[in-house]
Amino acid sequence: MERTSRVVSRGLTAAVLALGLAGPGRALAAPPDSCGVLTTAEIQAAVGKPVGEGKLNTKANPLGGRPCEYRVGDLGLFSVLVKPAAAGETPASVKAELERRRIQVSPSAALGEGSFFSSPGYGMVQLNTFKGPSYAIITLLVPGGPEAAQKAAAERLMRLVAQRL
């Protein structure tokens, strides 16, 4: 469990680093409630395993956004981060930064041009989506779960997030 938490923390750190920070002089809107965008029941239905209550990661840098984190089964983790996109933060710029860091990027055909997957390693799947002024990231790590199933669950949940932005 300790190792899984460290792996997910590293993946979330990579995602937040890729997000960038708001440029000087840009006012940030109040951050969206990452823990209010999905219900535990919705996550559980998508991943097919028991899901614990979400907790806001208060240790994350508030300028990069604070994800809501959930335990999935015994060793898995799920998180959702919703934040205002920073100045210059676009799908193309985030993809370029991830690729520069040698993090694999692939399209999400189900969600359109503003969405793409990133694969930071260790079996973790991240789905990035831009909608209007908002940027959302779903991170899913279910040990032993097939990547295709995790991607399908992430897409299903991101559709719900996108409807609520």
Image (cartoon, grey):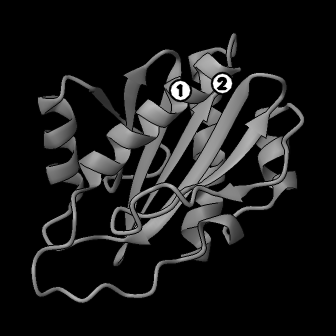
Q: Nearer the viewer, residue 17 or 138?
A: 17
For disc 1, the neighbor class at 10 Å (few under 14, some 14 to 19, many from 20) is few
Q: Nearer the viewer, residue 65 or 87?
A: 65
User: From the viewer's perspective, is 46 left or right of 79?
Assistant: right
Answer yes or no: do the residues labelled 2 and 1 have beta carbons within 8 Å?
A: no
Residue type at mark 1: give it: Arg
**Residue indicated by mark 2:** 149
Q: Residue at x 39, y 52 (%)?
A: 112
Q: Residue 51: percent from the left, percent from the top? A: 84, 41
User: From the viewer's perspective, is 163 left or right of 127?
Assistant: right
The image shows a total of numbered marks equal to: 2
The secondary structure type at the circle numbered 1 is helix
Q: Residue at x 22, y 64 (%)?
A: 21
Q: Residue 10: percent from the left, percent from the top? A: 42, 31
Q: Earlier in the sequence, mark 2 or mark 1?
A: 1
Q: Which mark is residue 6?
A: 1
Image height check: is 58 above or below 72?
below
Image height check: is 5 above or below 157?
above
Q: Residue at x 60, y 57 (%)?
A: 159
Residue 46 visible in the snapshot:
yes
Q: Residue 22: percent from the left, percent from the top? A: 20, 72
Q: Which mark is residue 145?
A: none
Residue type at mark 2: give it: Ala
Residue 109 visible in the snapshot:
no
Image height check: is 48 above or below 93?
above
The secondary structure type at the circle numbered 2 is helix
Q: Residue 132: percent from the left, percent from the top? A: 36, 76
The picture quadrant where one finds residue 105 is: top left
